Image (cartoon, rainbow, N blue to C red):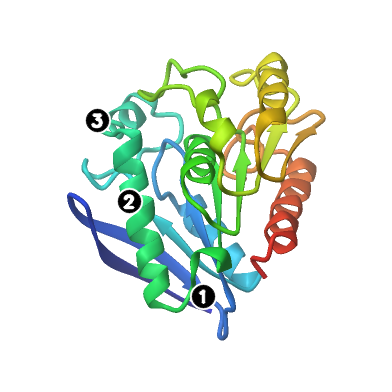
Amino acid sequence: MRTRISTVQGSDGPLAVYEAAPAEPTKAVVIIHEAFGVTDHIADVTRRAANAGYYAVAPDLFHRVAPGVAAYGDLQAATRNFAGLSDDAVLADVDATLAHLATLGFAGADTGIIGFCFGGRVAFLTAARRSLGAAVTLYGGGIVEASKFLPFPALLDDIATMKTPWIGLYGQEDVGIPQSEVDALEEAMAQAPVDWRIERYEGANHAFHNDQLPSYHPQAAKAAWAEGLAWLDAHGVS
């Protein structure tokens, strides 16, 4: 495996992208970070995706602020990361990342996106407004209703025109995204014109995939990661 940090040109400045790739990748995936930025954990997840055969990239969506990475649990610093950020700015960064992958030979149909927490919402947003192979959301809030922690609108109005197959992976014990909210999302997704699915994991709280947090749930994390990669594979990102 080879890793590097590249700089691509975003719509309003340079965008750092952490990359990890196997010897001969035939598919690509964009990894979208949590509210804490491209942490060591997100870099590790990117390498895991590379180990699964993907050319994996993790763009720094917080490049507009410095340093853009916050310690887990430092919600004040994490909140600062969102200064001046909008859905349009996020999509511009995703577009720049996809354009970078295109220069490496990966077209949209060969590319998936996986996002965690804030990044899970970004994966949903991308699925709604861009055409990729497939999208995976892990515990992404702010979709059914605007999150009090994120300066972005709800995305229910985007469901009727979604462009990319999407799967949502949620913990049944998530205190930040209650089951009633997942129920509402599942009901709303019935009008989506793309393939979709929602899976829930018993005993799992928010951030159940993050092995650097007390909320880590090994069984749910393993199952959700396998489910996400299987979703990509089933929709041609293979």
Residue 215 visible in rendering = yes
Is 182 placed above or below 46 here?
Answer: above
Place residue 150 in its image quadrant.
Answer: top left
Q: Which residue is mark 3?
A: 83
Alpha carbon distance from label 1 to label 2? 20 Å
- What is the quadrant of the C terminus in the image? bottom right
Instruction: Indicate the secondary structure of the residue bearing disc 1.
Output: strand
Q: Looking at the image, which is closer to me, 60 or 234?
A: 234
Which residue is found at the position 74% from the left and 31% from the top? Answer: 204
Q: Which residue is mark 2?
A: 93
Amino acid type of the residue that numbered disc 3 sits on in the rendered structure? Ala
Q: Looking at the image, which is closer to me, 57 or 97?
A: 97
Amino acid type of the residue that numbered disc 2 sits on in the rendered structure? Asp
**Lateral position of residue 86 relative to residue 150, left or right:** left
Alpha carbon distance from label 3 to label 2? 15 Å
Residue 142 visible in rendering = no
Is 156 placed above or below 229 here?
Answer: above
Q: Which mark is residue 21?
A: 1
Residue 180 picture location, percent across and down: 70, 14
Residue 104 picture location, percent across and down: 41, 78
Place residue 232 in its image quadrant.
Answer: bottom right
Q: Looking at the image, which is closer to me, 156 or 218?
A: 156
Instruction: Count all numbered tags in the image, as a single digit.
Output: 3
Q: Nearer the viewer, mark 3 or mark 2?
A: 2
Q: Are marks 3 and 1 in contact (CB under 8 Å)?
A: no
Is 15 placed above or below 119 here?
Answer: below
Work out whether mark 3 precedes mark 1 in sequence or the reverse, and give the earlier one.
1
